[in-house]
Amino acid sequence: MQFLLGQDGLPAFQVQRIADALGRSLGRPVRVSATEFFLLDAGPLTRDAEARLHQLLHASSIERAGEPSFLVVPRRGTTSAWASKAADILLRCGFDQVRRIERGLWFRLDGIDAQALDSDHLDLLHDRMTESVVDDLEALQSWFDPAPVGGLREIELGRSPLDALDVANRELGLALNDEEIRYLAEVYRGLERNPTDAELMMFAQANSEHCRHKIFNAQWRVDGRPAEQSLFGMVRATHAATPDGVITAYDDNAAVMHGDAATLFRAPIESPAWIEQPATLHIQIKVETHNHPTAISPDPGAATGSGGEIRDEAATGRGGRPVAGLTGFAVGDLRIPDHAMAWEAAPLPPGRIAEPLEIMLEGPIGAARFNNEFGRPNLLGYFRTFSQRVDDRLWGYFKPIMLAGGSGAIAEGQTEKQPLQPGYRVIVLGGPSMMIGLGGGAASSLHSGQSSEQLDYASVQRANPEMQRRAQEVIDQCWTLGEANPIASIHDVGAGGLSNAIPELLHDGGVGGRLQLRAIPTADDSMSPMAIWCNESQERYVLAVSEAGREVLAEICRRERCPMADLGPATRDHRLEVADERTGRAPVDLDLDVLLGKTPRLQIQATSAAPELVDEGLAGIELDAAVDRTLQVPAVGSKQFLITIGDRTVGGLSARDQMVGPWQVPVADCAITLGDYRHYTGTAMAVGERTPLAVWNAPASGRMAVAEALLNLAGTVVAGRSRIKLSANWMAAAGAPGQDAALRATVEAVTGDFCRTLSLSIPVGKDSLSMQTRWQADGEALSMTAPVSLNVTAFAPVPDVRRSITPELVTDCGATELLLLAPPSQRMGGGALAMAFGRALGEVPDVDRPAQLASLFDTVQQLVSDGRLLALHDRSDGGLITTVLEMALAGHTGVALQLPAAADPLRFLFNEELGLVAQCRSDRIESVVSFLAGAGLGDWITRIGTVEQGDALRVEQAGACLWRRRLPELNRLWAATSYRMQRLRDHPDCADEEYAALADWDRPGLAPVVTFERGAPAVTGRARPQVAILREQGVNGQREMAMAFHMAGFEAVDVHMSDLEQDRRRLAGFRGLAVCGGFSFGDVLGAGRGWARSVLFNESIREQFRRFFEDSDTFALGVCNGCQVLSSMTGIIPGTAHWPRFVHNRSRQFEARLSLVEIVDSPSIMLRGMAGARLPVATAHGEGRAEFHAGADLRRAPVALRYVDAAGAPACRYPDNPNGSPEGVTGLCSDDGRVTILMPHPERLLRAVNYSWAPAHWVDEWGDWSPWMRMFENARAWVD
């Protein structure tokens, strides 16, 4: 074992946080340092190779650790995702002597006795679920030594099979019920043999509540009376009643809706020039939850939640492409240090699960990172905290909700899996098996606290989105082949691992399989047959292909460097045999009907038990105090800390994200994506959930969730109400008193007349029915029960994404008024005001008249389509006062609210009944009101005020001013929770700067200045010069980059680095080179530096690049990751000696912003004629801070692009300067201008419709395009 000492392992502010926490606990100051170090298992290295390795790792050799030291490393027996990606870089750079590498953190603690530290102190240094702490390097000498090889275990049934199986059930954490144990005893009695542990674990995962939805398929008796339909039967009935526009429902990994004619942009494998071809692309929809893993280890739990849902879309039909994502969280009280809220009175959760604050600091980062690295924009989400004691029962989310969903695209002809034929090959695509997530499906089916802590460790998972990106590239190449697609059927590998995915693949295809266990790739030779077969290692798919299709697939996989393994053939019988050549025994040998056939149907006896309604009234609550408290309820306040960490523009098909208006306020009601790069058709999606209401009235909570999702779509004109499709995610504490009956009542309420009246159906969804946490504290048995929680996501095709309005109040069209469109009821129970003051306020909101709700939606759709409404926002958490405040912030304008004379101000302003607030011109308001009234909505219309100049929100009644506050003050209140979370997570100085800016109401928003006109379009019919669209594994931005050059008249050619390595392509002959954005090698060893070193350390490839850059007839562009790559290759790029390197953002966080940049006068051939322009551009990077070698380099470097503030001055403060680069530098060029590098992404904003906000006059001046198109036209003009 070799040990190398690297650079600082953590930023100074994070180290100081650890020191402060240790100091508070120990009662004295502590000095802490943290340095990265590397564990290396390698063969002999030459002196030159050792020097190059040290250069690559920025490291030097060490022999022993100082005292006192603590070394934090991944847990023994695991391989981190970092290590997997670092190993790929080392292999690409020629270090094939290195067998294994890992990274650790070396903490030195001064002023402290190491013996004084207990496990609680060490928890401040590491994640106990994924890492270990040792106190000396010597303890790590054997860290990579293999564990004893695990063997196949038989469960001896003997004379008491039921008892033997019951013992195995507890030991292995199988979560089998008594009926299933009896079933298995009968099966093996008939087989006259003992089961293997692999067979039992496989059966448990395949038949877990998580996978088989036993409760939703159960037979029910409620309050002693039999119920006719199962829960799933009721859900399916919605589709039977309204099947409009649905192609696939319930029988695949995602539902499929009818899409539109589109232009498919692809790079065929036979001729890798990107081409456009007509296609019909349908819409995939899916929403999952990943609650248990997120409770146990928030970052990887949430990351693999998003990753698993992405795989569901890829594995629908014969393959599809994920397009856009959503993420949501519900947790208990945050208890932010030094920011205690009056309503946070629940006890602390048990130590075996993460606290809510930890979940919200780490879980969203995991989910965002997976989406970012994979290359899927996250455009939607929600966040709620809830803990409350009602009737001596503690309700809340110690077991959190982690929602992961999204939409995708699937081509006509690819939506149905093909029947399988004997002889088809069973393929595993993706990463290797590891000791990860073993038994996760069963563990997720248990209430928290029912399994052993060791089993919780076993269900922790690992995320490697870079591997999933590789697999997705393979799948994309396959399905875009159309009829020649080699994939006959595909399933993702999730809960239960291969032991669940392969039986599903074979069973659905009507065949069996004879497979070889040892053909499954593994990263750990010590794994037992059960572990190999049943582990839940992520980023994998199982495919069935013909013999001929196998060769096509193998060639694609070689090019994409995506592992694939052929496990064996499908067979004519329906038997699954998994042979193990190492032992000569079969870990699995069962008929598939035993595994997936008719296992005993669950019988449920449910008893109703609703809490008593109490109304303590509003006496003593002042309006000002109500506003102060309510705006700081997390479900009400700004969610910005959850938004800017997620890339929202990758792929170039985003049309509407969370940010609204020139001030980029996070208040959008829905997300919208485009169907392709040419047209305006698209998809909208919106979330609805009102889960706290279920404590008092679960059916009302369900109806309100559907209503919220529907009204969140109201501002975007969709293809029709019956074309809206819902994903329903049902969560409950099954078996807890009253909760089974509450769940059934909610399903009945939503799926019955309610959905039929609204013409809505639910073709997809998921349940998670173990939402209770149990623990012991001081000898007392405690529990927290989550209310029945229905999360609804509405998806709809959009004929024209431009027919959409937002909550941004319009101020440039004369006098305008606001309308409240809502039923007259004002029930207050279960809302933010009740939570903020800890009061029971009686009945909860509900949907009493679904027919009027349908009419409201249809009528508003027509008004939006006709252009008679200017802005629209739904009423939800926080009530009307919050809705109007958010609209005022988005529009940066004052509002005067006028309450009806007879209204109770608190009830009118804070009730959370369904509703919309609409802005319309005063000279049109009578016609709008008349139109609404004509639709039967007369008593749903209230004129509530006017938009006015200024910086205040006023509330008036009967001519008197009841309340007035300045908007900057309210903005800071609304943003307070987000700010404090950001400050705990990121660099506190950055959080402080952004929060301070909210107080400056005079601070301009985005103010573009265009100093040029569009260049001449490329002449059709002329030969297109070739530009290489270069990518490496982990790159995800090649499609939008290729389209930019394609639109400008180039022939864009897909070039993978493997093409250069295998001499399939050479750079000679290309006029241009575009190095694309993404996460090559997952940004391990520094963003872009691993890719750059793979070029520089390979003599023949280095020579190709050197000759290309020296050729005066060529040009190059590097964007984001490509910018980082080229900045690390200055030794072979003439005229770049003064370029900086790009390091971690000052915030130490991934930053996704719409930023204002100035195009600086420079030699850049791509920015010629554009100098002086100030344009919004997409920023999306984690390592974009320019670090110059010396001040002289900054002065001499040919800067091409810089972040500026609204006045045009170089941006020095965050977030105008999102990465902290000196003088806002974010783009440079070579001395002769032929090579340009940019950290932001102009290629993602080629069309005006791609912007979350753009000036309205751009449409008149630029048509479909945005000003950024000019830079690609410049490149074509230079070549000509």
Image (tube, rainbow, N blue to C red):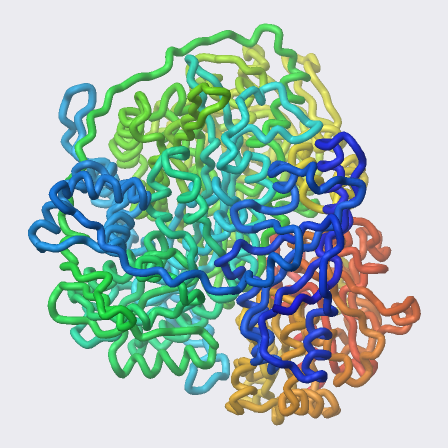
Residue displayed at 72% across by 61% down: 64
Judge whether 681 appears above or below 688 on screen.
below
Judge whether 20 appears above or below 148 on screen.
above
Q: Is residue 171 left or right of residue 84?
A: left
User: Residue 49's spot in the image, x, y percent?
Assistant: 68, 82
Q: Nearer the viewer, residue 947 or 356?
A: 356
Q: Is residue 335 left or right of residue 855?
A: right
Q: Nearer the viewer, residue 208 or 1059?
A: 208
User: Residue 433's spot in the image, x, y percent?
Assistant: 40, 63
Q: Nearer the viewer, residue 16 or 1131?
A: 16
User: Residue 663's spot in the image, x, y percent?
Assistant: 70, 45
Q: Nearer the viewer, residue 911 or 80?
A: 80
User: Residue 847's spot in the image, x, y percent?
Assistant: 37, 26
Toward the left, the furthest residue is 190
Instruction: Indicate the quadrant where residue 1076 lies.
Output: bottom right
Judge whether 1006 appears above or below 53 on screen.
above
Residue displayed at 61% across by 47% down: 126
Instruction: Identify the image quadrant of the C terminus.
Output: bottom right
Residue displayed at 79% across by 56% down: 1220
Instruction: Indicate the quadrant where residue 833 lies.
Output: top right
Task: Answer yes or no: is residue 511 visible.
Answer: yes
Instruction: Indicate the quadrant where residue 278 lies.
Output: bottom left
Task: Answer yes or no: is residue 722 visible.
Answer: no
Residue displayed at 37% across by 48% down: 440
Instruction: Identify the image quadrant of the N terminus.
Output: bottom right
Q: How many marks?
A: 0
